[in-house]
Image (spheres, rainbow, N blue to C red):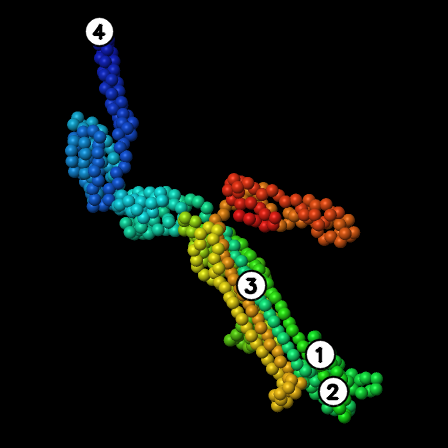
Amino acid sequence: MWGSEKPVRLTRAILIGSAAILAQAPAAIVSAAPAPAAAAFEAGKIEVPVNKSQVVQAGRNFKRALVGNPEIADVLPLSNDSLYVLGKKAGTTTLTLYDAAGALIRVYDVAVGPDVITLRRQFTELMPNEKIGARISNDAIVLTGVVSSGPIADRAMQVAATYAPEKVVNLMSIGGSQQVMLEVRFSEMSRTVAKQIGVNNSFISNNRRFQGGTGNTAPSTTLLTNKNGTPTIDIGGILDTFGIAAGAYSLGGLNLFSALDLLERKGVVKTLAEPTLIALSGETASFLAGGEFPIPVIQGNSGGGGTAGGTGGGNGITIEFKPFGVSLAFTPTVLGDGIINLVVAPEVSQIDPSASVNINGLVVPGLQTRRARTVLELRDGQSFAIAGLLSNNFQDTVRQIPALGSIPILGSLFRSTGFQKQETELVIIVTPRLVKPMNAADVRLPTDRVGNPNELELFLMGRTDKAVGTNPLDPNAPPPEKPALAPADKAKSGGFSGPTGYEM
């Protein structure tokens, strides 16, 4: 009995174990299968504006449609293979379609949010040359694509903000050259003409107790004595630089000296400054070629203690520095189609001793300044005169002895007449350019053409420098020029180097 029972029990245990293994194997296959099946049935993303509907074509007949979150979206069948998806609230959910047999046929990601469909259509109408994309991200709008300029991107952001205020994400990038080089030219011409005619007189008594003069002589303090012991006057105190005639004579006990002064001055001053500066679109760049001079500033002291540079209860003096020279500050903005918006502020200033002031024994010089600040729009390579000045000043003066100088004809001996005329013409011209970096091999510096002299050139020929590549025995020979780049190379490198500096 036991012997016959053992095989039966063993066989029964083997059959039960095999059945359990066979029963578990199909279950493992079914549970693993949905992962690749779900990926295969993904049908994409549906963007539905809030309170609007979207028609979905399934491509196959379906029997049942399920929405993951009915509070976000709802569906309404139209036919066997199409349905309406209605957006109810901003958010994301899924739409799943099944056939009559209950098999899965489609899975959609549904995003409900701002109306990006109408927004894309507006972008096409308002900015047809730009490639701007818009998509929903929860309750926000994400803008993508490449635009031609920063202002175009700002305009797109403003339009998108009407659909989702304060919920617009900018992922757009700006293409094209966005570096702007600004060339500014200060050109000033000043002409001065001055004429003067007069008679300068001086007299002194023999006993030196009485002296005087008219014109430029004042009473002279430089008294000389001739070989006879008679007092005389330094003739340099009478004659101006261009006095053309002088004479000395005596009248009783007076020694008289007279000089005819004729003077004509002509002068021309030409000023040309050409600062150049490069900045990125939307950024501000500044430039100064000059220096700074100190200005003493009196600081009030309300307390009882002293301050630096002062005494107790007094005022202290601090030093501030004022820049002068050639300066330039500008902010470019590339608007697209080669148009550049510029906020430019050029300035040329120099120290003017004639405008100095004296403060407690401290002489503070003044500045002669040419300054402009404006906003304008130009195309790449165009020039514009942003400021100009035409000044014509005339001044005449008459110095005379009262009454005597008013006598006709004879009165000219007792007066000095002069006039001065000054004409100034100033123009400031700006030229913006879109530029790209150059290749390092194409860069030429002003110092590349000048070398240090050797002992032979310095001590025997007196040369303080030499042109690189020239024969020291022929210093007048021009140095060899580097060949200019071909047009194709210019476009490739963004510019080429000239004899000095840069040409872009």
Distance Cα–Cα, label 4 vs label 1:
158 Å
* SS class, disc 4: helix
Q: Residue tagged by mark 4?
A: 4
Q: Residue tagged by mark 2?
A: 256
Is any atom of residue 296 visible in this view? Answer: no
Is any atom of residue 152 visible in this view? Answer: yes
* SS class, disc 1: loop
Q: Position of residue 390 (x, y in %)?
A: 52, 67
User: Of tags 4 and 1, which is closer to the observer?
Assistant: 1
Q: Residue tagged by mark 1?
A: 239
Dot 1 or dot 2: first in sequence order is: 1
Distance Cα–Cα, label 2 vs label 3:
48 Å
The one of 208 and 394 positioned closer to us in this rendering: 394
Dot 4 or dot 2: first in sequence order is: 4
Residue at x 75% of width, y 83% of height: 247
The one of 47 and 437 positioned closer to us in this rendering: 437
Q: Residue furthest front?
A: 409
Q: Quadrant location of residue 332?
A: bottom left
Dot 4 or dot 3: first in sequence order is: 4
Q: Residue tagged by mark 3?
A: 188
Tell me the kind of residue under disc 4: Ser
Distance Cα–Cα, label 4 vs label 2:
171 Å
Distance Cα–Cα, label 3 vs label 1:
35 Å
Tell me the kind of residue under disc 2: Leu
* SS class, disc 2: strand
Quarter of the picture holding the N terminus:
top left
* SS class, disc 3: strand
